[in-house]
Amino acid sequence: QVQVAESGGGLVQAGGSLRLSCAASGSFYSIVMAWYRQPPGKQRELVASIDRGDSTDYLDSVKGRFTISRDNAKNIVYLQMSSLKPEDTAVYYCGLRTFQRTYWGQGTQVTVSS
């Protein structure tokens, strides 16, 4: 059984930094690991993704501020977030994409105060 668990969220002031972690366990072959977020009252959006070749992609509004990386040996993906803005406030979810489906974690809350 594949399990995905996020950690590292919290409350931070604007301009601050946080690092989110996503640990995956079980038997799987991940194509892409990604971070999504869902701001209050809005739809979930893709924030950053990284594939097995370490190619990355970012939401335009986070480019230059967020960095996604992965530790393949530990099946962990990180999201380093810097220069945080109030509009980054959301529940952040990790998605592990395989050929069959995407596995989701429970999410971690990130709140940026102005």
Image (cartoon, helix red, strand yellow):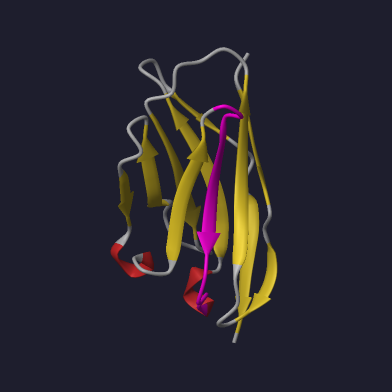
For residue 42: magenta? no
Q: Position of residue 104 (x, y in %)?
A: 54, 34
Is residue 62 left or right of 111 when viewed as pictured? left
Q: Position of residue 107 (x, y in %)?
A: 62, 46
Q: Position of residue 100 (x, y in %)?
A: 39, 15
Q: Nearer the viewer, residue 29 or 72?
A: 72
Q: Position of residue 57 (x, y in %)?
A: 30, 50
* Quarter assignment of residue 71: top right
Residue at (53% x, 78% y) in the render: 86
Is residue 60 left or right of 2 when viewed as pictured? left
For residue 82: magenta? yes
* Quarter assignment of residue 22: top right
Residue at (32% x, 32% y) in the render: 53
Range of residues picked out in magenta: 73-85
Is 72 above or below relative to 42? above
Q: Across the whole image, how many numbered discs are drawn on residues? A: 0
Q: Nearer the viewer, residue 3 or 91?
A: 3
Q: Nearer the viewer, residue 6 or 106?
A: 6
* Quarter assignment of residue 30: top left
Q: Where the C terminus falls, by quadrant?
A: bottom right
